Image: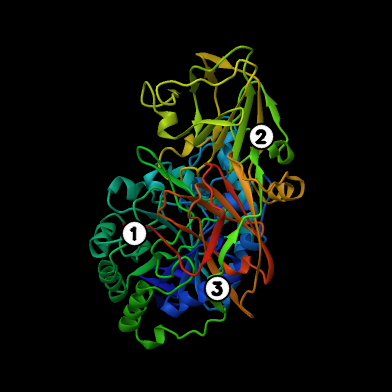
Amino acid sequence: MGKCEIKEKFYVDGKPFQIISGSIHYFRVVPEYWRDRLEKLKNMGCNTVETYIPWNFHEPKKGEFRFDGIHDVCKFIEIAQELNLYIIVRPSPYICAEWEWGGLPSWLLVEQGMHIRCSCEPYLKHVREYYEVLIPKLVPYQIDNGGKIILMQVENEYGYYGDDTNYLKFIADLMRELKITVPFVTSDGPWFKNVFKAGQLEGVLPTGNFGSACQWQFSNMKKMMPENLPLMNMEFWAGWFDAWGNKKKSSSKLIINKLDYDYVIKNGHNINIYMFHGGTNFGFMNGSNYYGKLTADTTSYDYDAPLSEDGQMTKKYHAFRKIIKTRLGDDAVPNIDFSTKIEHKNYGKIDWSECADLFENIERISEPKKSVVPLSMEEAGQATGYIMYRTKMNDDECANSLIFKKCADRVQAFDDTKKIFTACDKEICSGQHGHWPLTFKEGKSWKIGSGERATLSFLVENMGRVNFGHKLEEQKKGIYDEVLINTHGHYNWEIFNLPLDEAQIDKLKENGKWEREPSKNPAFFKFDFDLQTPSGGYGDTFLDFSGWGKGCVWVNGFNIGRFWEIGPQLRLYVPGPLLHSGKNQIIIFETEGKRSKTVSLCEKMKWKRK
């Protein structure tokens, strides 16, 4: 059995050990590529891999756990161990990570009296029940049980959020109770003493998260840490993430990255590149940030990482590899024969063959819930995706004014099936006092209703719950308070869940009303096509959505993520394992009425660069 100790340095099996690590999130990579990405990590010269574990990914519904397929974190750990990589696991209930609600499960939002990330009894109860399932799965992989896990994190960047030391102690004590024996770490930004100190816990190694000025940052950290402990950058931001609406793709300055990385390796400090390989926000799992307005993260989580979203070794990869080799010698950088054959393919244009209008199919794929008042997405039993609210106007009444007291994140209003307006975030939540409510107007004035009990429908999209900061407790989605029509509350609603998960898409394929003519409303478009994929390997490709407005895409039943014409991401990554030799199918859900007859499957990624 091995052992990891923290003294003036890290020690593994009694020998000094410099942690040279890179982040790979198994939940952002198809399982068929886990080995490839880990092999490339080792090939660069890293001796350790780090990953978060997102709670909402493993317990999407209370008491219903998933550890199969892409959720199989144990399999990911086992592959890392086979490659003789050490492992840092960050399983805290909250992970940030630009992930939907920072990894917290949305069902927490329904419970009365709930407060997250503090010593709130209902929250602690759910954390315990989750950890009692998760932690025993990790215990056998600890170094002192014959595995390769050397460190675990207690919470994540807690100093930015709160100062409840008792909460941190609860998490640490619970992990020890459940037989976690390896050393613990915390991680926080080291710029401000109140932040860095607030996230610390006695007996736990503090580490820092920063992307530049490593020499200064380590010097500053040292002043705020117990003496004679090793210095570690737990998140060396060698890149950054992207949000829809950005003018161009985020990128770092390689010359600065190299100077910082060289300083750390040369001086024997410890470092984890965040991200070594970013991967993809498949499905609806992207997070958002809120600094004055909502900024939803793109489907791609490329992060300008050393290993690109599709697993390509970049200039940054080769520069970091050279630094490790120069400072630590040839033996530190193995030459790996990569075991996974991956090609990049240009499969060309594909026409859509059939279309399914949302309004004509809504009752075929979703059973309406009847409620006097609108229910939030969470109250309606849904986590992500879209949700439709439908109601009847009173006789001879038109909606001259409309106020949503609370609605998130993006709403489209329809008079019967005619779109009246689209509004998002600030347009919804700006108003008389800088927030709720807002009276919508289309141009100078508009009216909804024909005077004959017209149907009023609202399609609301959850664009990704905020994953950082003090808006975390304000992340209910859909319409979750009164709707005022002509200044009075309007009641009696039908609510249609549209999680657009695998089961619902299967129901649409089997029971949907598919037609040859395009719909002007939100609609699903079906593309059936044949492919000849590479023999004995995988053919990665990229879906170009030029000519399409906004929505999401399924490839052979797997949700590869959202698209939006505003960019900066202009194509969606389609990993080769999702494609088959022979018959394949793509389904696109588009909400804006902006469609092309085709999509293209291209060989390369494309971003806005200016």
Which amino acid type is marked by label 1?
Arg
Q: Is residue 385 visible?
A: yes
Q: Residue furthest front?
A: 517
Which amino acid type is marked by label 3?
Ala
Query: Is 551 left or right of 328, judged from the image as shown?
Result: right
> The residue tagged with tag 2: helix, strand or loop?
strand
Mark 3 and mark 1: Cα distance apart in space: 35 Å
Which is nearer the eye, 561 or 113?
561
Residue ID for mark 3: 80
Look at discs 3 and 2 and give the one toward the viewer: 2
Residue ID for mark 1: 609
> Quadrant where the N terminus lies?
bottom right
Which is nearer the eye, 345 or 156?
345
- Numbered circle sitting on residue 28: none
In which quadrant of the rendered view does residue 234 lie? bottom left
Above or below: residue 358 compared with residue 39 = above
Residue found at x 49% / y 84%: 336
Residue found at x 57% / y 41%: 106
> The residue tagged with tag 3: helix, strand or loop?
helix
* Label located before the other in sequence (1 or 2): 2
Query: Is 282 left or right of 196, judged from the image as shown?
Result: right
Look at discs 3 and 1 and give the one toward the viewer: 1
Which amino acid type is marked by label 2?
Phe
Residue ID for mark 2: 496
